[in-house]
Image: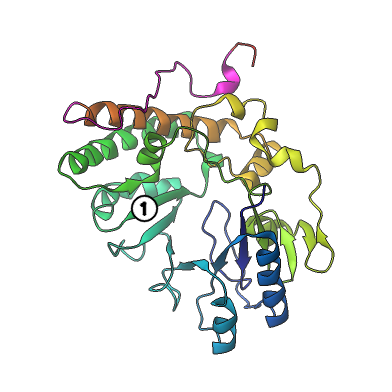
Amino acid sequence: MLQYIIIQLDDTSTSYCHYSNKAEKPHLISLDDLKKGILFAMKENLMIQYVLPDYELTSEYIEIMESIDNNKIASSESVYADDADVVVLNGWKSGLALKEEKIYVLRTDKKTLFEKYDEIGTAITKCMRLNIVITDIETFTEEDFETYRSILGTLSVKMEELHINGKDVQLNLLTDRIMLDKMNNCNAGWESITLAPDGRFYVCPAFYSTEGYSIGSLAEGLDIKNPKLYRLEYAPICRHCDAYQCKRCVWLNRKMTYEVNTPSHEQCVVAHLERNASRELLHNIRKHKEFLPNIDIKEIKYLDPFNVRQEW
């Protein structure tokens, strides 16, 4: 069931997920389409998330945008970074200069993450929440998995220190699984859709920026082919999985397995490494104090559920 509509205001609006938006020429959504998009959200009772450009919008656009409750996503380079609910860091060039009241998304490739992960331990003490998005998961090798396992272990020690000292910080790689008791996936195409600057609907911004695969328009309405495929209950492996923090990125699924509801081996292993590190963090925090007594993360012997020989 739809809950959100993401309105990408400009072709150059930042990516906040795995895909890379390489658009350089501004192309702003028309005022008419923006109004129609807001009206669509009101009729369908959808929460609006704006993805803003880096440049300043006219007062007319701002007035229309603020005519309804919304959340804003902007890059750290945007003139709206200070006003955004979520600020996207495209790489580490900003030196992770963060603000305590903000939620940040750090988009990074694996090589830079492996080289600079120690900066995360400091960064998470300076903001409300930090989400790490690895932009090239599809390139992970067995050696990379071991490196990532080690990095998660190091970050877990830092998170343990912070929690026992009363610092309640959130790092998606480690704390999300601890806080969840069911899947919290991306759910694009099922719980959210995107309205792009061309006035058409897309499963998510990635399908607009990289593929141009539309699922309807403001004029024609939604037309999602095989909508059941975007729902968890129709994902034969994922619906039994307890790596609840995994985003099951629909675009990345399709890119790597050609199926929107089936993650790749690389995605599953990364998600289960995070799950297991979260389990260890939960266990270690409980050595010091009572902590989330109703949460239980069981020990497992696999990293890719596809390899488990059992009947699902």
Q: Residue at x 48, y 23 (%)?
A: 303
Q: Which residue is mark 1?
A: 130
Residue count near mark 1 (Cα–Cα under 10 Å), binned few <14, some 14–19, many ≥20? many
Looking at the picture, how far across and down is residue 255, in whole percent? 67, 44
Looking at the picture, how far across and down is residue 51, in whole percent? 55, 67
Q: Residue at x 55, y 41 (%)?
A: 185
**The one of 143 and 254 positioned closer to us in this rendering:** 254
Q: Residue at x 61, y 72 (%)?
A: 9
Count of numbered circles on the image: 1
**Quadrant of residue 48 in the image?**
bottom right
**In the image, residue 307 lies in the stretch drawn in magenta:** yes
* Residue with the most extreme bottom position: 59
**Quadrant of residue 180 in the image?**
top left
Instruction: Read off the magenta span.
Output: 287-308
Looking at the picture, how far across and down is residue 120, in whole percent? 30, 50
Kind of residue at disc 1: Leu
* Above or below 275: residue 61: below
From the image, give the main secondary structure of the stretch colored magenta: loop
Helix, strand or loop at mark 1: strand
* Above or below 18: residue 282: above
